[in-house]
Amino acid sequence: MTKKEIDIWRDTPIRLLGYTNELGESFRYIFPRLVRPSYFIATGYCVCDVIDKSSKTIKLGASQAAINAFDCMLWQILASVAIPGFVINRTVHGSTWVLEKIKNPRVTPFVIKWLPVMIGISTIPFIVHPIDDGTTLLLNKTTRKFYT
């Protein structure tokens, strides 16, 4: 029986650092200054994974280090930054829009301000694996056909 090697960047809670920008997107309309630093952290996480994967490839003597680095960075940018950032941004925007249209005295400005943030944050755990799996499938059916 072979034991699967654990990838700390994708198989541990460190993976959630790639979703830091989703916290920024959740708070975008309340604390806009949080957005850029959140993307900086998420992008830094992506770069760390690329460095890790590339150094492991180079240590094995593989000549495909540049291709592996490109593939890893493409996967990370899509799965950790672009797609989830868009999903959370639209979730918060859409829930804000719906709440603003509701004509109910219980939907106060406080609710309109904070409920979309909570919806955005609570959405994050549910999108991680579907986006990761979808990104892998997307790359398998597109770019990876050219270099694997």
Image: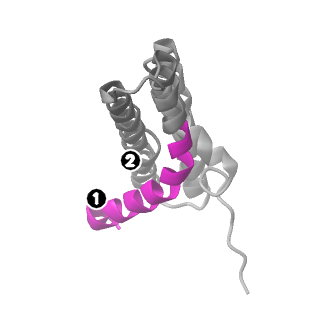
For the stretch drawn in magenta, what is the main secondary structure?
helix
For label 1, the residue is: 143
Amino acid type, label 2: Leu
Q: Real-space Cα distance between discs 1 and 2? A: 9 Å
Image spot of residue 55 (x, y percent): 59, 49
Image spot of residue 26 (x, y percent): 48, 29
Residue at x-position 34% and y-position 66%:
140
Q: Is residue 142 above or below residue 73?
A: below
For label 2, the residue is: 74
- Quadrant that contains the C terminus: bottom left
Judged left or right of residue 92, residue 129 is right
- Marks 1/2 in contact by CB < 8 Å: the verdict is yes
- Sequence-wise first label, 1 or 2: 2
Residue 49 lies in the magenta stretch:
no
Image spot of residue 13 (x, y percent): 68, 49
Give the quadrant of residue 18: top right
User: What residue span does the magenta drawing correspond to?
Assistant: 121-148
